[in-house]
Image: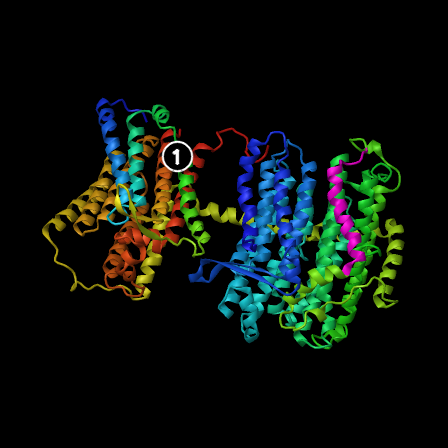
Amino acid sequence: MKINDVILRTVTKIVVFIILTFGVYLFLSGHNTPGGGFIGGLVLASAFVLMYLSSDIESVQKSLPLDFKLVAAFGVLLATSTGVGSLLFDVPFLSQTFAYFDLPIFGKTELTTVTIFEAGVALAVVGVVVTIILSISEGE
Amino acid sequence: MFTANLAIIIPFIIAALVPFLYRRLKFVHIGWFVMLVPVTLFILLARLIPSIASGKTYVHTYNWIPSLGINFTTNLDGLSMIFALLITGVGSLVILYSIFYLSFKESLQHFYCYLLLFMGAMLGVVFSDNLMVLYVFWELTSVSSFLLIAFWHHRKASRQGAQKAMLITVSGGVAMLVGFLMVHTMTGSFSIREIIANISSFTDHALFVPAMVLILLGAFTKSAQFPFHIWLPDAMEAPTPVSAYLHSATMVKAGIYLVARFTPVFGGDQVWFWAVSGVGIITLFWGSFNAVRQTDLKALLAYSTVSQLGLIMSLFGLGSIALHFGYSADSVIYTQAIFAALFHLINHSTFKGALFMVVGIVDHELGTRDVRRLGGLMALMPFTFTIAVIGSLSMAGVPLFNGFLSKEMFFAATVNIGNADVFSLQTFGIIFPVIAWIASIFTFVYCMIFIIKTFLGNAQPEKLDKPIHEAPIGMLIPPFILGAFIIGIFFFPNALGEYILQPAMASIYPTFEAAGSLTPTISAWHGFNTELWMTIGVFVIGSILYNRLKNWKPVYKLLPQKFSFNTLYMNTLAFFEKGSTTVTKSYMTGFLRHYLAYIFMFFIVTVGGFLFYSGAFSFDASTNAEIRAYEVILVCVMAIAAITMLFAKTRVTATLLNGVLGYSISIFFVIFRAPDLALTQLVVETVTTVLFLLCFYHLPEWKKETSSSKTKFSNAVISIGVGAIVMLVAFSVLNYDKFDTIASYFENAYELAGGANIVNAILGDFRAFDTMLEVVVLFIAGLGVYTMIKLRPKKGDADIEDQ
């Protein structure tokens, strides 16, 4: 996936950060406003894909030493273990709960177990999308 | 707090940790650590024996999916206690044995991981009260057994044996699942305790007998009953510790457990009685008859296991008749069959486990287990010889060993059944003692073969690759412990009866008030009665037959190889493989466009057919909002893009036009105030466009279509059909009211899930189970793409499977 394009590379350097921030924002805001794990994951994945598109795979892997298969596996594990985790509290599988806390900086904040579940979804989406795109682009 | 749920989960957790631990341990055999699991569980369970014996049961529930009636409920009662003690007790000994059996060179992390998986699954089978949970663990034992049989997977016989065991037990398991669902349809419950309480009002139900037969199929395949026994001898390709553990002491007894557990449900019915006792007694005969001709010691033990399982099975059948009569002073005599079954179940685990370990020692130290190459080992392997004698004589039913006691009780039960005047037993009841007696003679003969041909006579060191020597002490301790049980139980059978067997009798006969009265006093000497004469007859005729073995052995040649059940299995398998290859090849052409045509035609037929036949199509424009000018413009843009795609010259153009379509749809979502959908559509569109462009990099130039006008015409019909159906569905959906509305989720998402974004509240909370499984599917798809592209063999590479 080597495209020698100075403009693309220069733009990518800045844009990737904007996309990554946007992805994280979408993920976190998903509880009350549009967004969520799936979309957040996809946006993050598109940022990584853009990185791979603008420069070659080796140099990206040097600066971002992530095995995306493991990321996906970890995401699936996280999502399923939140389900199992609820059994420890004697409630049915995959019960979600939420509560409001007063945190030092953020003020009154809602913390939910859905966020953990959604994080699993997001990681699985990122991992799978990047894995698929990388394997197809590397295949002979 | 220790619960049975915990006992099930612990082996799974440790199994997950084994690979990590294995990497750290370089000089210590990992088996030592794994052994702590069954030992701890055994001690924890054994501490509960007194309270179980006093009639207590421990039920513990974790709500899993309560809306479907599926809960992780465990029921620790007398019956599950017996099995759990066997699983953890024999498990501890087998792991100790395996530490000396498997060297560091083997992939130990796999072995112990599978073994712990099996242990957890097996505990799950015996503790689960919920049928669905039980089924999952049931299949998990098949899977772990498959992995363990194929542990030396470079050997073709191992792989074939594993496949055979898997195919037979899993197909039985699926039949059992259908049976469970039928039981659920009848009683409305998945809980075994509730089913037992309510079944009496459903005995005339149309599903009663089919459910029973299907559940029995599951039990018979798992417990290697005739004619499904053929997988067990082939499963002996597994390492010997596995054979001793799974294929004699525990897993093959899962079917027996199931029969025992369902005796209060189906027992008392004539079909149940004849199926269980009939199949059991045939298996008993067929197994012992075939064991005599084996030359491989492990195959001999495999057939002997088949036969002993048949014995236990038939006893459960005979005992179920007591439920037909109900509790009375006269019917107690029939319950003794089940008492004998439980007793023999424990005895069989002790002597068969010891015998398998003996064979393992012989195989491990001498490199062969073929009786034709063995002989005269007695002087050189005195300890192994001692255990072999104890185990075989117990199996043959000789006094001073526990097998004698349960064998006598078995004879007594078969004789007693002739006194019952139901189920046409007055006529056919005589079959049981006769077959039991003949089969016991063969049992005696193969026990003699096991001892005499292996250990007595002249040594034949020239036929062996290794010098004859005694096994290391670690391999001798476990069988010696079992040997101590064999003798100990003979002298103190009533301790076992009171503490272990009596509570189990209470589980099998829950409607009989006094479980204490069902427990007989076991005594080795009870005068010269029928069963003692039967035993003496077995010894006399068995010895004669053994001495005249050469004269009558040709009887096995009468039945040609091509009529065996193995041949039937092979032919069936070959037939199905050939058939499915033919069918698959006829439509799998390798052209994507054909596959798309199949998918679309299926879509047209099913969705279109549904719309047409159910009269679901309806179009009512009266409630529609006004169509505005920019919506028309958007539609026009999309239409133009779609039509232009047909005339595009390059793939890139077509992809970009496709992107125009996708982005226009997201604009529609924005207009209709669905920001979530719009966002998702935008990102998905971007990622898929990238993916398309990447794929095209590998594809050749887009050539002009050269297909015949006939193909073109049919393609056009299909595409127009799909378009029309989608349009009709879109129109009808507005007024469709056959499904429940999902509006209930919209109303109070904030109070229920704490989130104002309803879409996410549905995805992550209300319907989180769907989302979780979707994530798993996505992951599997990703791994599939990765493996297909990265791990496929290069051209000219050898087939990975055949090393």
Q: Position of residue B340 (x, y in %)?
A: 74, 63
Q: Residue at x 81, y 38 (%)?
A: B373
Q: Read off the residue under disc 1.
A: A68
Q: Position of residue B684 (x, y in %)?
A: 28, 42
Q: Quadrant of residue B543?
A: bottom right
Q: Residue at x 58, y 63 (%)?
A: B214
Q: Is residue B140 above or below residue B786?
A: below
Main secondary structure along the magenta-highlighted residues:
helix
Name the one closer to the observer, A24 or B499.
B499
What range of the chain is rendered magenta? B468-493
For numbered disc 1, what is the local secondary structure?
A: helix
Name the one closer to the observer, B566 or B415.
B415
Tag count in the figure? 1
Q: Position of residue B576 (x, y in %)?
A: 56, 50
- Amino acid of disc 1: Phe
Name the one closer to the observer, B547 or B575.
B547
Q: Quadrant of residue B33?
A: top right
Judge left or right: residue A5 versus residue B213. left
As drawn, the residue found furthest toward the left would be: B629
Q: Position of residue B57 (x, y in %)?
A: 59, 63
Q: Is residue B141 above or below residue B529?
A: above
